[in-house]
Image (spheres, rainbow, N blue to C red):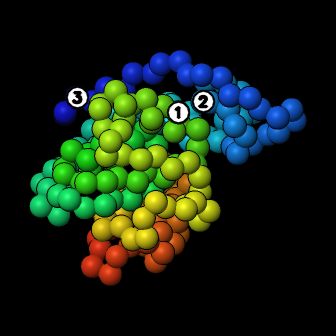
């Protein structure tokens, strides 16, 4: 499997208003407590590590993009629920001109570092927030990628979110990956 740098480094501290709880507070993944993880379970690197170690899953996504570089070349791609950014990086390496990676959990702290370590910050832009609440820097995208089934199929299934994004941002001749 192609090597990508997924090193975890420290991050700068962010201030948190007293008494605020849940995934919307302004803290880095390293600053989160077990209570925070309860509300923001996808911020925990272990869940992503498990998914990344699933070689069949990871290689299937990579191969789907790498074997279809002609579809990605020069396109604008939207990655819904980008997590660590692995699918965004595959899309960038497959030739996408721009990748917009949306993630609502605090795993974005790690994703930014991983994307920077792989020198893909000029192609991949991370947008933190819920798909239904964010503004994109573009009106339409050519391709939407997502691991929409979530962790263990039904845990945080994102199908409704992907369909919302498709209806709002996918160009008329756009594509979903995967589409089956």
97, 35: nearer the viewer = 97
Of marks 3 and 1, which one's residue comes earlier in the chain? 3
Residue sitting nearer the eye, 155 or 100 = 100
Q: Is residue 54 visible?
A: no
Label 2 sits on residue: 29
Give the Cα separation between the discs numbered 1 and 2: 6 Å
Q: Mark 1 and mark 3 in contact (Cβ < 8 Å)?
A: no
Q: Residues within 10 Å of mark 2 (few under 14, many from 20)?
A: many
Residue 116, placed above or below residue 75: above
Query: Looking at the image, can residue 17 be seen?
Result: yes
Q: Which mark is residue 109?
A: 1
Measured Cα–Cα span from mark 2 to mark 3: 24 Å
Residue 166: x and y, percent?
43, 73
- Disc 1 element: helix
Q: Residues within 10 Å of mark 3 (few under 14, many from 20)?
A: few
Residue name at image x 51 percent, y 50 percent: 127
Tell me, yes or no, whether the two marked residues, 1 and 2, touch with CB atoms within 8 Å. yes
Q: Residue at x 12, y 61 (%)?
A: 70
Answer with left or right where residue 134 lies relative to residue 140: right
Left or right: 173 in relation to 41? left
Is residue 8 depicted above or below 102 in this figure?
A: above
In the picture as drawn, the residue positioned furthest to the bottom comes out as 172
Which residue has dot 3 on it? 3
The relative height of residue 52 versus residue 155 in the rendered view (above or below) is above
**Residue at 70% across / 45% down in the picture?**
24
178 or 139: nearer the viewer: 139
Find the distance from the CA under tag 3 to the CA under tag 1. 20 Å
Tell me the residue at 38%/59% (across/down).
78
């Amino acid at each position: 499997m192609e090597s990508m740098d997924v090193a975890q480094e420290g991050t700068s501290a962010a201030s948190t208003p007293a008494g605020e709880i849940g995934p919307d507070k302004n803290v880095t993944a390293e600053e989160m407590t077990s209570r925070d993880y309860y509300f923001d379970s996808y911020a925990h690197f272990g869940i992503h590590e498990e998914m990344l170690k699933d070689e069949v899953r990871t290689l299937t996504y990579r191969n789907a993009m790498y074997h279809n570089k002609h579809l990605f070349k020069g396109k604008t791609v939207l990655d819904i629920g980008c997590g660590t950014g692995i699918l965004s990086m595959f899309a960038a390496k497959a030739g996408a001109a721009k990748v917009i990676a949306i993630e609502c959990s605090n795993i974005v702290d790690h994703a930014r570092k991983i994307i920077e370590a792989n020198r893909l910050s000029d192609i991949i832009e991370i947008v933190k927030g819920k798909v239904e609440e964010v503004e994109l820097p573009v009106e339409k995208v050519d391709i939407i990628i997502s691991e929409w089934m979530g962790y263990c199929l039904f845990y945080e299934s994102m199908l409704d979110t992907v369909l919302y994004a498709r209806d709002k941002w996918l160009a008329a001749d756009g594509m979903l990956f995967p589409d089956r």
